[in-house]
Amino acid sequence: MSAGTAQQILGEVFGYTAFRGPQQDIIGHLVAGGDALVLMPTGGGKSLCYQVPAIVRQRAGLGVTLVVSPLIALMHDQVGALHEAGVAAAFLNSSQSLEQSQEVQGRLQRGELTLLYVAPERLNTPRMLSLLAGLHERGLLSLFAIDEAHCVSQWGHDFRPEYRGLSLLHEQFAGVPRVALTATADDLTRQDMIERLKLGQARQFVSSFDRPNIRYRIVEKSDPLRQLLRFIESEHAGEAGIVYCQSRKRVEEVAAALQGAGVQALAYHAGLETALRQQRQDRFLREDGLVMVATIAFGMGINKPDVRFVAHLDMPKNIEGYYQETGRAGRDGLPANAWMAYGLQDVVNQRRMIDASEVASEAFKQVMRGKLDALLALAEGTGCRRVSLLAYFGEGSAPCMNCDNCLQPPELWDATEAGRKLLSCIYRVQQASGLSFGAGHLMDILRGKRTEKVLQYGHERLSTFAIGADLSEAQWRSVLRQLIARDMVRVDFEGMNTLSLLAPARALLLGQGQLWVRMATPAAPRSRQRPQRTSVQGLAEASLNAGALERLQRLKAWRAEVAREHNLPAFVIFHDATLRAIAQRNPQHLQALEGISGMGTKKLQAYGADVVRVCTESG
């Protein structure tokens, strides 16, 4: 079970010539029987880290690798991809009939499987545990791989209680190595994962969290739907993307609006029937140029490589969620965009959800508030987005020159005096009436608006009335967001989002410290004409000559037919990069396909003759 064996499998089975980043070290450690915790960004090649050891150990007679995976769709596509590569793999989940489950269990008991994918709920059943105990007694249980392992932590962005039961792997199957893998975990989540999964002695492999091909852009909300549409039309017309919204209602509204504007868009949320959700997810994976508008119910494990953008129309809960979701863009390594629109109401809504929880402890709520504040700091920040994002995960970096703040540094204005005025207004209002009021009313007072409510309470007589008439409402909201982010102002959700002062406000009121706020950028008018642009795929294919481009189109058409026959996404058959390499080489015989990245032995045997035929027919 040497590294050479793993290298051989990498080429023979998966068609790659070299490991990426820490893959080789991780694989060697697991092949030797060690436990591991692997943090690797989306698109970094986590699956190979357990798939290659699974094959090596199975060939050495050590039995099956069990992969714990939270999503049926992910299991289906990964097993399909392994079948295409000639690996004996199967899954057990609720989508199967009794007969299908029994057939898989029979293969498992007979030692015919290299990898078996199961959901955590299925793993914890007496039947499954009994099957595994039998394999363990026979020495045929090789490795446990826990995918999306952040789900075990209450501090993670996608906590799933059923993952807590996975501690039994250590307790009941001593000696079987375990690897926990995730793309997202800050220090707190990481420590919780180690404790919950009993991985205290495991070797930790932490890759860089940087996704250099993703351009981060965060804008202040003005007319968010119009902003989103302008973003898609100007930069991603006809390309695949994901738009995240906070509520099911908002998802439906945005999907309808995009469809009305000529964008191929689908809605996805937990309120839809299971069959319809599955149908739409399958369409997104298999068709080109679709935009999925979704709640966070969609996305984990989505392996579509050509997602060109991820847009957040509402602010996520924390940086982990933001990073995980934006990481679904550009898995093929080509340029992609992460775009987010945020506003004061996003902060208010997220704080409300934290504070309104009846089951969470105060300590838990405090951690969640801190995570939200970190995301707000990222949004409001004036420095490099990537530096701030990576710093959150404990990684140092230099300015990237591939985010909005680097490419177009924001102007700042000294909002110290404005901050004092707002804090003073909150204080004067409470002092005058013994009541707290919301942001809109306070801004009316500051801007000198004699509304019915202002006159009703006599707030036009306050010393703070009209002292902020020189600032726009958008500027006042920027100031308020900063004061909330700095814990100077509290939003009381039980009191209709009313504002009150917190202890840190005292220092600013006494003239201690400064408050700098980024200048709001005026929204550009929407063009009546759809801009002409070259897609990322077009740029990737620009180096191909006319003959190679024709071959590429024919190869894509052939691949689409094969994918439909196999009921798999096209990229599972061959990635676009592999097809481009084939089109460039123009093979006239099977030997000419050897060495092309992604062309393993099984695929060469299964598809080589057809690929050569398509190329020779193209001339």
Image: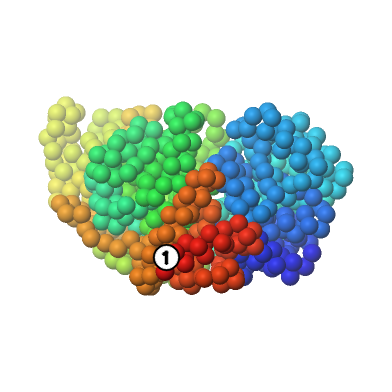
Query: Measured along the vertical axis of the image, is residue 448 above or below residue 479?
Result: above
Does dot 1 land on a helix, a strand or a loop? helix
For image coordinates 54% across by 54% down, the residue present is 573
- In what quadrant of the picture does the N terminus appear? bottom right
* Residue sitting nearer the eye, 246 or 378: 246
Q: Where is residue 599 in the image (x, y as percent from the top left)?
A: 58, 63
* Residue sitting nearer the eye, 185 or 579: 579
User: Horizontally, is 91 left or right of 500 in the view?
Assistant: right
Disc 1 residue type (three-letter): Ser
For image coordinates 39% across by 33% down, the residue present is 248
For image coordinates 32% across by 44% down, the residue present is 264
Name of the residue lying farthest toward the right:
137
Q: Can residue 155 be seen in this view?
A: no
Q: Residues within 10 Å of mark 1 (few under 14, many from 20)?
A: some
The residue that disc 1 covers is: 618
- In what quadrant of the picture does the C terminus appear? bottom left
For image coordinates 77% across by 54% down, the residue present is 58
Q: Where is residue 524 in the image (x, y as percent from the top left)?
A: 19, 55
Q: Position of residue 543 (x, y in %)?
A: 38, 73
User: Horizontally, is 167 left or right of 560 in the view?
Assistant: right
Q: Is residue 63 visible?
A: yes
* Residue sitting nearer the eye, 35 or 555: 555
